[in-house]
Image (cartoon, coloured by chain):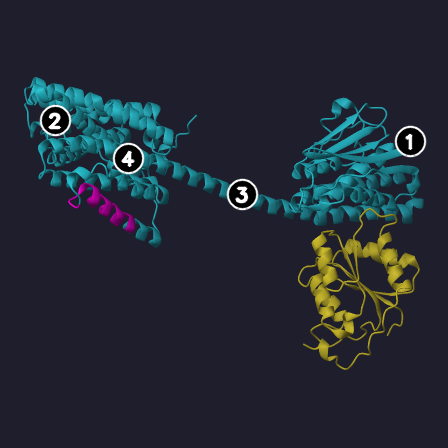
Chain colours: A yellow, B cyan
Amino acid sequence: MSLLPTILLVDDDDDYLFVALRAIERTGLRTDVRVARSGPEALTLLGLGSGLPVAGAPSRIAVVMLDLRMPGVDGLEVLRRMQGCSRTRSIPVVVVSSSDRPDDVRQCYELGANSYVVKRYVAHPPGAYVAETVRYWVQLNETPRLPPEREPSPESVR
Amino acid sequence: MRSERPPSARGQSALWHVRALPWPALLLLLAGVYFAAGKLCLRLALVNPSATPVWVPTGIALASLLWFGSSAWPAILAGAFLVNVTTAGTVATSLGVAAGNTLEAVAGAYLVKRFANGMGAFERAPDIFKFALLAGILSTTLSATIGVASLALGGVIPRAGLGLAWLTWWLGDVGGCLVVAPLLILWTDGSTRRWTRAQALEAIALLLCMVAVGQLVFGYALPWRLRFPLTFLCIPPLIWVAFRFDPRTAATAVLVLASLAVAWTVGVGRTVEKTLLNEALVMLPVFLGVSAVTTLTLSALVAEQRRREETIRSTSERLHEAMTELEAFGHSISHDLRSPIGAMLNYATIIEQDYGGRLEGEGVRLLGRIRASGEAAVQLLDQLVRFVWVEREGDQREHVDMSALAREAFAELMVGSENPDQVEFHVSELPAANGSPALLLRVFRNLLSNSVKYTRGREDRRISVTGIASGPENTYVVTDNGSGFDPQLAGLLYEPFRRLGTARDSEGSGLGLAIVAKIVRRHGGRVWAESDGVSGARFCFTLPPERNGT
């Protein structure tokens, strides 16, 4: 089990993931970056999946960088499920979306998002905004430790 | 210009089958119908055997010639001749009467086709008036004059009663034309309408009401002398039918009223003095003709109004659909198009950063150009999204502190700026406005960023926002001491998708000012710009002032 702070990137856009991963790597931060390419994948990594908790699920998540628009289980649904479980409620979630619609922003905060960042396509260097965001959540922000995982966590079994 | 509906839209009714008949058979049928209607009407003839209060054949003849064309006249001639020759008079007088009837129909049909929209005469009020005047009043004099003259010459009616005979004849034809022809035309206009249960019930109630009123006015219930003073009682049911039903039903209601009136007048008339009855029979077609024209006009107006409402409804529905599509389009642009272009942009930058060393000078230059193009594309897309967003934002209106908004917009602009202190920015006390804060912030953002852009390179960059409340509108002015623009191009600045290649907006998307104009116009204001082309520019817009009490 990794003891590094975990960053969970949830996005179905490979181009974004490429740029984000590269930007995070270049921050020089010692982090464990996990990637989920869909809502269900993210829920599994968060221990909220339909099955049993997977081995190697991160124990301490510094921040979830969550995309909104994904086919099937979208970002809002992931947020909703995270709020519905006491174990994941305290994990910081930064919504990273290409939408700057006021409705989307408001809805995300109402569902418990901690921050909302609009994807920048014109950024120097590429993904600079991801790097800055991650630096804040990993280096400056304090998060409560996750409660130890019970076996199996009642809330995670549906 | 009046648009004539294509012929295929009409006559999809029983008439269509009649049209399919061979021409001689059709003429024969027409003559038969005319004859039957004539004989039926003559049973009501009281003053003299050839004139009745409502001469139904006049309406039938006119409608037939409108349906089948004037070449169907031999059928009218034959029908009319047969009616007369089997009733009274000689072959000669009957020929004369028949000729008059035929001429009346041919002239009426010609005039209606020429001046009153033919078969569509009952769709619009002006056409109904023309129909009443030309076919109803004018062409019917032909039949009356020729008919009465023929009978007089043949010695069938005494010369002493000529005046009354002419009048009765003429009015009977007027009644027949105005009551019967519209009914026939409207029932064969090819449209199919079905009543709902509620409408059917209402129609029954209307019918009962008409029978009651008809009985009261024309029947046995009241003394004879009260009937014409009371005819106004017929108006409410006629208005009822005009407002609540279609023109076709209105014409039918008029026929029902006419039938009741004629039948009861004749029935009751047997019990009163002959002069009184004659008087009644002269007044009756006048009353019925006026009722018919009034009811049909009202009904046409109501129908027109309904059509207009329907048009507005369907137009606004289409508009709403288009707006929804536009929104989806805007979203598609913002999300689906921006991300791949953004990705290209990022890859170009990454290649530049990571592998730039291995590229020749030309390669680096080309990569830079890829990046520049990509950035321009993303900016344009952002602007396009905002352009669409103006519509979506809706019409919410609230108190807006314009001074605060201008300062906020400028502060936002300066956040990313490397040396914000370089621009001297001044906002005077601006009159408050009534509008959407989000949209008006966008106005200031675009105007100020425009000014910031065009003061670049100046030693002392100055931008100021001033405003004045004057009468019906507030005027706001953003002034800068930048490079300005060619005064001749002032009118084009605010047009969307127009880049003034040379001066203002040459590096932007060309939408910034268009968005300003769109937002301001949505608020009911105006935009304009002033510049001498050298020492800066003034961008002005007006907004309606904040209303008191809001």
Residue lying at the far top in this picture: please name it.
Answer: B153
Q: What is the spatial separation of the Cα atoms under label 2 and label 1, in whole angstroms?
A: 101 Å
Q: Mark 3 lies on which chain?
A: B
Give the labeled residue for mark 2. B81
Q: Which amino acid does label 1 sit on?
A: Arg
Mark 2 touches mark 3? (CB < 8 Å): no
Q: Is residue B215 magenta?
A: yes
Magenta stretch: give its range.
B205-221
Q: What is the spatial separation of the Cα atoms under label 4 and label 2, in whole angstroms?
A: 28 Å
Image quadrant containing the N terminus of chain B: top left
Q: Mark 2 lies on which chain?
A: B
Q: Which of marks 1 and 4 is nearer the N terminus?
A: 4
Q: What is the spatial separation of the Cα atoms under label 2 and label 3, in whole angstroms?
A: 57 Å
Kind of element beneath mark 3? helix
Q: How crowded is mark 1: few (under 14 residues within 10 Å), some or many (20 or more)?
A: few
Q: Which of marks 2 and 3 is nearer the N terminus?
A: 2
Dots 4 and 2 on the same chain: yes
Give the labeled residue for mark 4. B292
Q: Which of marks 4 and 2 is nearer the N terminus?
A: 2
Q: In this view, does A57 lie to the left or right of B267?
A: right
Q: Which chain carries label 4?
A: B
Task: Give how far across and how far down residue B352 sits, in percent.
Answer: 89, 45
Closest to the observer, B508 or B160: B160
Give the labeled residue for mark 1. B458
* Disc marking residue B316: 3
Q: Is residue A18 magenta?
A: no
Q: In this view, does B371 lie to the left or right of B54?
A: right
The picture quadrant where one finds residue B364 is: top right
Select label 2 or label 1 by which is in front.
1
